[in-house]
Amino acid sequence: MKFLYLLSAIVFLVLMDAPGFSHGLLTHHACRNRGGQCHFWKCPYYTRYLGKCVFGHCCRRRFSEIV
């Protein structure tokens, strides 16, 4: 029984939010509204980081296209 208390305390500490990671995650739709796309691993070199998506990073093109 004492093991159960220890296990619940460890689970609580592991799942507790850290102060730096308490901001909300962007959905794919919210990222598109900001003018970006969700990339799975990290932003490519030609893009700028906008926020964190549910499965990766929200990135927008850094360079404007010349028409």
Image: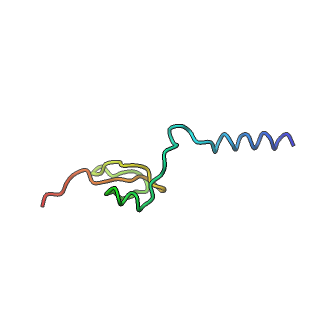
Q: Position of residue 14 (x, y in %)?
A: 64, 42
Q: Quadrant of residue 3?
A: top right
Q: Position of residue 11 (x, y in %)?
A: 70, 44
Residue at the outermost left position: 67
Q: Nearer the viewer, residue 56 or 21?
A: 21
Identified at 31% across, 57% down, the residue is 35
Applied colour scheme: rainbow
Identified at 40% across, 57% down, the residue is 39
Left or right: 56 as drawn, with respect to 61: right
Q: Position of residue 4 (x, y in %)?
A: 81, 44
Residue 53 vs 18, above or below: the answer is: below
Left or right: 47 as drawn, with respect to 13: left
Q: Nearer the viewer, residue 46 or 65?
A: 65
Q: Position of residue 1 (x, y in %)?
A: 87, 43
Q: Quadrant of residue 36?
A: bottom left
Q: How many marks?
A: 0
Identified at 25% across, 50% down, the residue is 62
Q: Nearer the viewer, residue 16 or 63?
A: 16
